[in-house]
Structure formats: C-alpha cells, structure tokens
Amino acid sequence: MSRNHSYLVNGHGFIVHSTDISLLIVDEQSNTASRKYQNGDHVYSVLDDACASVVSWPTGSFSLPKPKSGCPSGWDEGYRFQDNEDNSNNNRVTLGSTHHFYGIFGVNTKMYYCTKTTYSGSSDSWPKGNYCFARKGGSCPSGFCTGFIYWDDEDTANRNYKSGVLPDGQYDSNTKINYCCRSDGYAYSYINLPTSKPFYLYKYKSACQRVRGMTVRQESVTMDDEDVRNESSDGGCHP
C-alpha cells in the first residue's frame, strides 16, 4: 500500500496535504472471553472488552488526535488552529459528518490532541506492529523511528494559533509535527492496547493496525496548503 499521507496536486495547482488516521472503536461483537479467527496463515484471538480494557498505556509521553468521545482520564489536551489556503479551498474530511474527530473542519482546521505526559504505564515497550503516533518529549520509544510533516499554511493574513499541550513540533505561521512510527509487525495481527475508549492511531506503511477488543475504520483529514511558493515538506518516518 502507498504511504498514508501524500501531496496531491490537482488541476488548479493546489497542493493538498492528506493524512490518513485510523480510528479504533470498541467491537460490540467480541463479547466472549476469547474468539479465534483465521486470516490466511495468521491466527489471532480477540478478547472481550472487559479483558482487553485492563491493559494500560505504555510508559512515557506521546500524543494522539482527540476523538469526539474525549481523551483518556488524566491526559492533557490542546488544539492547533491552521489557517488553510484562502483561494478555492479544497479542505475535506472523509466520511463527512460521520467522522469521529473532535475539532472544527471547514475552510480552516482546528485539530485537538490528547497527550499523555506522565511516565507511568503498563510496560516500557509498545507492541510490534505497523502504526504511528505523534511524538512528545523529544524522542521516540525503543522500536520506533522519528520523522515529521511540515505544512506551509496560508501566507496572507495568517491566523494560526494554538492552546494547551501539543505534540512535539513547530507552531508559528506554519505547522510542523513530529511523529514516531514502526513497521516491525503485521497490521492484521492484533496488538494489546486499552479499549475503554475509542482512540486514533496514524496508519503507516500498510493497512490500519488491529487492536484486540476493537474494530477499526480509516478516517482522514485533507488540508489545502498555501498555493504560492509552497514549502510543505516531510522527512524521516511519518504517517
């Protein structure tokens, strides 16, 4: 599968930056203690919500997009308002009003984030898989590589602003966000993460990462960057 974020140049010369984000939702059908499913050569078990929800988040700091259901208890929140292209704006959100992003998505974008800032957690390591999250604390955990996406936001009368706790990055008249990604596991192999609330993971090099006790669907936000002398860029490992 192609990379999950891409620059798309349409017929009007706009540079559109699209990032696909996978939303994980509690699976109402997984109501037995354990079920086994066969997927080609891969056999995996899906635990029920009660079993899977006892898993805690890994130690360390990191940041995830905020869903409408809210942030995990004890996490910090913040938002970034990005002033997107003024002329013939091409912003869009997949699935229309049925998406689960908490924020404002019109001709400009106001994206909210949930950030874990405490060290406490269930273990020092994240499970192997194929996914990303936004970096917090200056470095990525073991097993992840780091990278960034840089958005060249609207130049004319730029109104970018921010509030609260945000991922590592640069937040001025343009926006840069750092990420941590890994691809050492199979996206269709279920990993253990908390399931008490829906949450987002960024899709990386393949399909959306599966999580025990949850279902998954892909949602994305597309932001139309500055048209004139655009300097949007990316580097390293990122969605």
Image (spheres, rainbow, N blue to C red):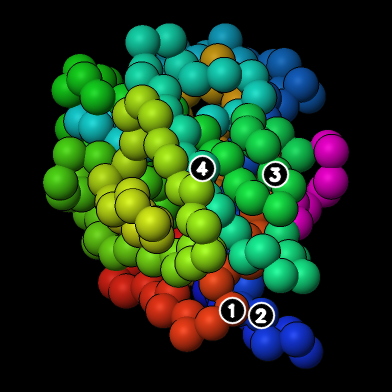
Task: Name the residue carrying label 3.
Answer: 105
Residues at circles 2 and 4 in contact by the CB criterion of under 8 Å: no
- Disc 3 crowd rating (10 Å Cα; few below 14, some 14-19, many 20+) is some
Residues at circles 1 and 2 in contact by the CB criterion of under 8 Å: yes
* Circle number at residue 227: 1
- The residue sitting at 24% across, 24% down in the picture is 117
Q: Secondary structure at mark 2?
A: loop
Q: Amino acid at mark 3?
A: Phe
Query: How many numbered circles does the render carry?
Result: 4
- From the viewer's perspective, tell me whether residue 183 is left or right of residue 153: left
Looking at marks 2 and 4 on the same chain, the residue that comes earlier in the sequence is marked by 2
Q: Secondary structure at mark 3?
A: strand
Task: Name the residue carrying label 4.
Answer: 81
- The residue sitting at 37% across, 18% down in the picture is 75
Give the CA separation, mark 3 to mark 1: 19 Å
- Tell me where the magenta segment starts and ends, as one range: 92-98
